[in-house]
Amino acid sequence: MGNQLCKDFEGTRPATRKLSVWGDIVNADTRAILSVCLICNLDYDFEQVSTLHEEHKRNKDFLAVSPIEDVPVLTEGSYKIISGPVHFMTYLCSTRDLVKNKLYPKDCERKINIHISWF
């Protein structure tokens, strides 16, 4: 499956392609996603969900996105990625050429995959 992760299912992806990042800035995975978005000049919305104040357990909008009450979460319309850092980055590389070309170049795929597999 590899880089074809979401391309095989393009008919199931939302037409908007507007990326939203739900997370808490104190969360390392959230910061990693936001860093990729900034480095690659991606258009995205950031929805701050304070885990220190347990907002992730009370915010009805967030609970509709993440029933497991965990941050971060990526959404595009009704499409949701609730997982771990490798899945977030794989999704961004698979769906956005800007990310793939800048952070996952063809000549480095093998070396990058070796490091990703560590996690």
Image: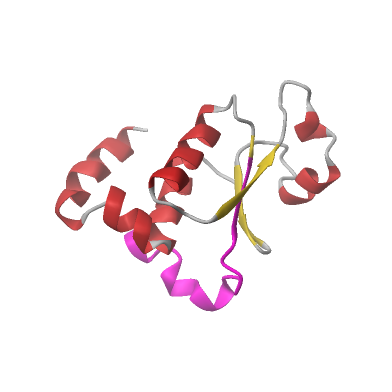
Judged left or right of residue 56, residue 18 is left
- Give the image location of residue 12, x and y in percent: 58, 74
Residue 59 magenta: no
Q: Nearer the viewer, residue 78 or 5?
A: 78
Corner quadrant of residue 78: bottom right
- Give the image location of residue 38, x and y in percent: 45, 44
Quarter holding the N terminus is: bottom left
Judged left or right of residue 87, residue 112 is left
> Which residue is drawn at the image coordinates 35% and 63% (left, top)?
97
What span is colored magenta in the figure?
2-22
**Residue 1 appearing in the image:** no
**Residue 83 appearing in the image:** yes
Corner quadrant of residue 35: top left
Q: Is residue 9 above or below residue 48?
A: below
- Give the image location of residue 49, x and y in percent: 72, 35
Judged left or right of residue 47, residue 101 is left
- Give the image location of residue 51, x and y in percent: 71, 26
**Farthest residue, direction top:** 52
Q: Nearer the viewer, residue 117 or 46?
A: 46
> Which residue is drawn at the image coordinates 79% and 44% (left, top)?
63
